[in-house]
Amino acid sequence: MSLEKLKLSKPLVAAMTEAGFLTPKEIQAKTMSRILGGQDVIAVGPEGAGKTTTYVLATLMKLKYAFEEAPRALILVPDAEHVDHVLEQFKLLNRNSTFRILGIDSRGAVDTQMNEITDGCDIIVAVPDRARALYLKLALNTNKIQLFIVDNAELIVKKGLQLPVVELANSAYKSQHIVFTEVMHEKLNHMIAPFMKDSTSTIEVDEIGEKQAEVYPQMLYHVPNFRTKLNLLTLLLNDAEFFDKVVVFVNTRLTAQTVYKNFNNPKEGEISIYRSLFFDDKGYDDIEDFKANPEARVLIVANENLGDLDIQGIPFILHFELPEQKETLIQRIVKQDEEEVVAITFSTDIELIEVKKIEQAIGQRMDIMELPEDLKIVDAGAKPKKKKKDEDEDTSDRGAAFHEKKASNLKNYNYSAGTKAKMTYKNKKGLS
C-alpha cells in the first residue's frame, strides 16, 4: 500500500518519504480515513505500531490553516519524555514550520507557559495535570479545540492522571476525541467513557514479532487487583498434590512477607521465603536446599537485588508480580533441554502493558486462563458490611467486599484454569 492511499497532502507525502516512511503502517491504513472523516476513534496497537505518526499526520491534515489565536489541537501524553518525542515527530513532518506547536510539562514555569499560550499556538502537546492547571488559570482556551488526542492512555491511567484528562475532554466538548493505547482494560474504559461517543470506532492491530526462542507453556490470569491475586494464588496452591514444587516470584521482600502470611496454617516447612526479611520466618538462603527438601513445596522469591538464581528442576514458575525488566522474566521461561515447566503469570489491568511487551519480545501470546468459579474477586471500591453482634459466622454470604465474576473475565474454554494447567503438564510428562 502506498502513502497516497492515506489521502495525505502532497507536502505530507513528501515529508514522509524524506523521513524514510515509504509505506503506511497497518494502524495508519485502518484509522486515518476514520479520523479524517471526523469519527471518534480508539486505536489499540503495540509499541512501534506507528500510533504517534498516525495522529501527527491526522493533526496536520485536519487543521489545514495555521496561525490562529487559540489552539485547535490538544494532545495529552503521560510525561515530559513523551512530550519531547511527539514534538520531534511534529518537527519531522511539519515542514517549513507551518504550525506553531507548544510543549507543556512540569519542566517549565507556569507563568512562562501561560504567556506562551496567550502569544498564540496551533497545537499543544502536554501532560494532563499541567494542562489542567493552565486551563483552571484561564490560560488554556479549549473552546476552539477541534482534535482532543490522548496518547499512551494506558500509561496515563497507570500514573493516576485520569481526572485531568476527563475534565479537559469535557471542556473541549465540540472536539473530535481520539485515544491511542497499547492495551484496553476496565480502568482505561472508565476514564474515556465520559467523553467518547457511542459511535466511537475501535481499531486494533495485533502485531507480534517473530518467535525468538522456545519457551515453556505460558498461562496468564487477568485479575482486577492485588487482593484478588492473593486469593487466586492461595486457591491454586491449595492443590498440594498437583503443585508439588513451586517458585513464586514477587518484586520486593515486603511483598514476599505479605504473600507468605496470606497462607492459612500451612504444614511445617511447606511454604517458605528465599532470604527472608525477618529471621524468624521460614526460609532458605540456598535454593538447592529447597529443591532437596521433599517437604518444602512453595518458595517465595523477591526480585529485589536477586541476581542469578538456578530454578532448573522446578516444574512450576509463578510470576505473582511482573519484574521491572521484561528480560528478567523471559530468561526464566526459555526452555532448558527437555525439561517440562509450566509458567503462570498474574496480571492486573495496570500490568497488562508489561504482559504485551513480554509477548512482543518472545513472539508468542500467553494463554488466557479462565478464573476459577470459587475465586473470591475483591471489589476494591466496596466497603465490607458490618456484622451484627448476633450474626453467625456464615461464610456462605460473601458480603459487599466481593462480587460475581465479571463478563470480561469469562473465557470460552471448555476447562477451568486449574484443570487445563494439569492437563498441559501431565500430557507433556506422559502421565495419565
Image: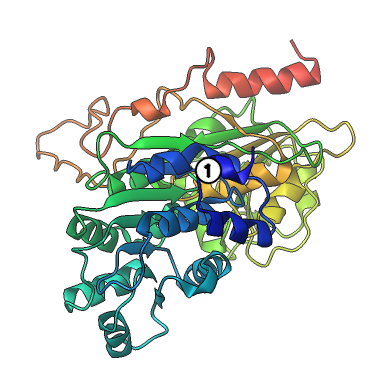
Between 102 and 296, the residue placed more toward the observer is 102
Identity of the residue drawn at 24% across and 56% down: 169
Identity of the residue drawn at 28% across and 84% down: 119
The answer to whether 189 appears left or right of 257 in the picture is left
Residue 316: where, in percent of width, then height? 69, 36
Quarter of the image where one finds residue 251: bottom right
The quadrant the C terminus occupies is: top right
Residue at the limit of the structure toward the top, as seen here: 432
Between 44 and 50, the residue placed more toward the observer is 50
Secondary structure of residue under mark 1: helix
Kindly tell me whether residue 380 is visible in this rendering: no
Identity of the residue drawn at 62% across and 50% down: 249
In the displayed structure, 116 sits above or below 345; it is below
The quadrant the N terminus occupies is: top right
Residue 180: where, in percent of width, then height? 44, 49
Q: Amino acid at mark 1?
A: Leu
Identity of the residue drawn at 22% across and 32% down: 393
In the displayed structure, 112 sits above or below 177; it is below
Residue at the limit of the structure toward the right, as seen here: 337
Q: In the rendered view, how is the structure colored?
A: rainbow
Between 103 and 389, the residue placed more toward the observer is 103
Residue 424: where, in percent of width, then height? 69, 21
Q: Which residue is mark 1?
A: 6
